[in-house]
Every structure is written in C-alpha cells, then in structure tokens.
Image (spheres, coloured by chain):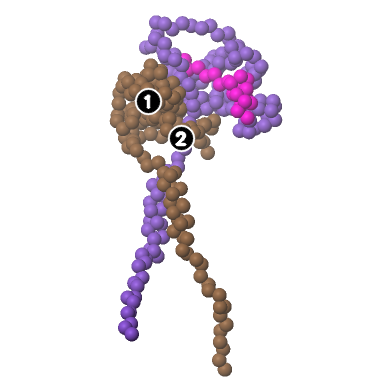
Chain colours: A purple, B brown
Amino acid sequence: MVQIKKKKERDANIPDAGMSDIVFLLLLFFLVSTTIDVDTGIGLSLPEYIPPEEQEFVPLSKDRLAALNINENGDVLLDGKVIAIPQISENLIPRIESKINLPLKKKLVVSVKTDRKTNYNLYIQALDQIKYAYAEVQKAYAQQAFGKKLSELTPEEEKTVKKEKVPIIISIAEPEKI
Amino acid sequence: MTFNKKRASVKQEIPTSSMPDIIFMLLLFFMVATTLKEVEVYVQYKLPEAVAIEKIENKRLISYIWVGKSGKIQVNDAIVKVEDIKDIMYKKRQELPNVIVSLRIDKESDMGIVNDIQQELRKADARRINYSAMLKQ
C-alpha cells in the first residue's frame, strides 16, 4: 500500500500580537490632536440695517428704557447716573421683574451705547451683566410659575418664559457718525 | 525533605484578545470627536471673560471673525479689510441662511472696530452674532 503522505498544512496566521500596539499609536495621535472645545460666548441679534436717511426715531417712554453708556475712560452711566459695572445687574433685575406681566410692547429695553475708543472688554463685561440680570429673572420666574429649573422646562413652558414673559431685549445704539 | 509549592492549577492569565477591540472603540470615539483645525489663525487675541455665557450647539453654523491685538481682521484664512466683510458674509449667508457669526475679538480692542464690523454684518444681513468669551473662573 502506498502511503500518500499528506503535506503538512502550514499555519497561515497573521501575528496579531502587535495589533494593539498599532491601535494604541493611532489612539494616541487622536488623543493628542483632539480639541473638544465648545464655542462659548454671548449671543446677540443685531438689528436690521437701515440706511441713515431712512432711519426714524421711535419714541420710547422713559420707564421702558434703560440706557447704558460707556465712555472711553471706562465710566459707565445707567440712565445718566454713574455706576460700577458689577452693579448693573442689581439695578436691572427689579426693573425687568416689574415688567414681567406687561405686554411685549411695554417691556424693558436695555440700550447699550459705546464710544469708538471704549475698551471692548468693558463692553463685554457690561453686556454680561445685562445677560446675567435677564438670566436671573428668567430663573426666578421659572421657579415661581412652574416650580422648575430653567433647564427642566418643557419647550412650551420655555417659550412662555423666554419669549413672552422675560424676553431679552438689548438694543445696540446706532453708532454716531463723526 | 522537599517542599513542593502548591500552585493553583487554574491558568492565571487575563484574556487580552479583545484588547484591540476596546482600544478601537476608544479610537473611534476620538476620531469622531476630533475636529482638526482647518484654519490657521494669523492674529493674536485674548478673549474676554464673562459669566452669563451660552454654548453654541451647532458648530456647523458658525463662521468666525478674528480681530487681533494689532487691529487686524481675519475672516476664513485671510486678513481682510473692514469693507470686505460685507461681501464675504453676504456670500456665506446665501450658503447658510442662519449662520452665526462668532466674533473672536481681543479684549484690549476698541469698540470702534467692533462697531464697524457690526455695521458690515448688518449690511450683509448676517445678524446672529456671538461675542466669543471664556467662562470666568
């Protein structure tokens, strides 16, 4: 009897011991190059552009308007009175609160006006104070009306708070021509 | 007398065969979360700090304008003049109707340049803006 010897099969394995090393390298690369940075900042909607000749003045009653002026020396005036920047929110909160139940046309308008030479940082600090004041009022109102935190409101309730009761109305004054 | 150390007959090995799988998962996460910087920023700037800041959820909507210490303005990957912003932003707005313009302005800048940029943005009707700021610690 002839014995046919079967050829011994060779192991056809790809060595995969170093696989994890390679993947580790890739992982390290992405770990290092990743920047999970979230863009944060103060949001604002600019008013529509109207050419100077078509601009008209809409009279605003005095109790609706909170006029904030910041001059080039860093002095801050709220309705003509000198004020420190950290005090802006304390001043605005009661005024915003007093108008919660008024219709949209009667809500407080915060107007911010700056000089060309005003420091940008000061402007942001002032804007921050205004935003902070509104956020505080919204928070208080949500707690009082719905008994919830702002983040827990349903979209419907959020709309009532943010659009109807405590809308943020910040007006950026038209820059003056020199 | 000989002492034979008793050894447990059970194999004491941690199975490592699925290690690459786990690392692949990590890798995938970082690959997805990575946004490689597409633009080189030529201007130097330090952002102001604020408390009442909000996050911009949708990164795709954002378009940046940098203003550096020297007062130079950069849009996309080029230094531009104030007057050019209007055209650039107008085009952007046609592609992305609800674009958010993120203003990354050095905190020592003057309001004059900020006002000029805002006027240009208003002319281009790109009115949703965001003053980029860091959270005050």
Give me the chain letter of mark 2.
A
Amino acid under label 1?
Glu
Residue at the bottom extreme of this rendering? B1
Observer-nearest residue: B30 or A32? B30
Residue at the front extreme of this rendering? A1
The residue where tag 1 is placed is B95
The residue where tag 2 is placed is A39
Quarter holding the C terminus of chain A is top left
Observer-nearest residue: B11 or A135? B11
* Residue A155 highlighted magenta (yes or no): yes
Q: Position of residue A12 (x, y in %)?
A: 35, 67
Instruction: Give the residue drawn at x 53%, y 72%.
Output: B12
Residue A20 occupies quadrant: bottom left
Instruction: Give the residue drawn at x 40%, y 18%.
Output: B125
Give me the chain letter of mark 1.
B
Residue interval drawn in magenta = A154-173
Residue A171 visible here: yes
Residue B97 occupies quadrant: top left
Same chain for labels 1 and 2? Say yes or no: no
Q: Is residue A2 above or below residue B113?
A: below
Amino acid under label 2?
Asp
Residue A90 visible here: no
CA neighbours of label 1 inside 10 A, class few (<14), some (14 to 19), many (20+):
few
Give me the C-alpha separation between circle 1 and circle 2: 21 Å
With A112 as the anchor, is A138 left or right in this view?
Answer: right
The label shown at residue A104 is none
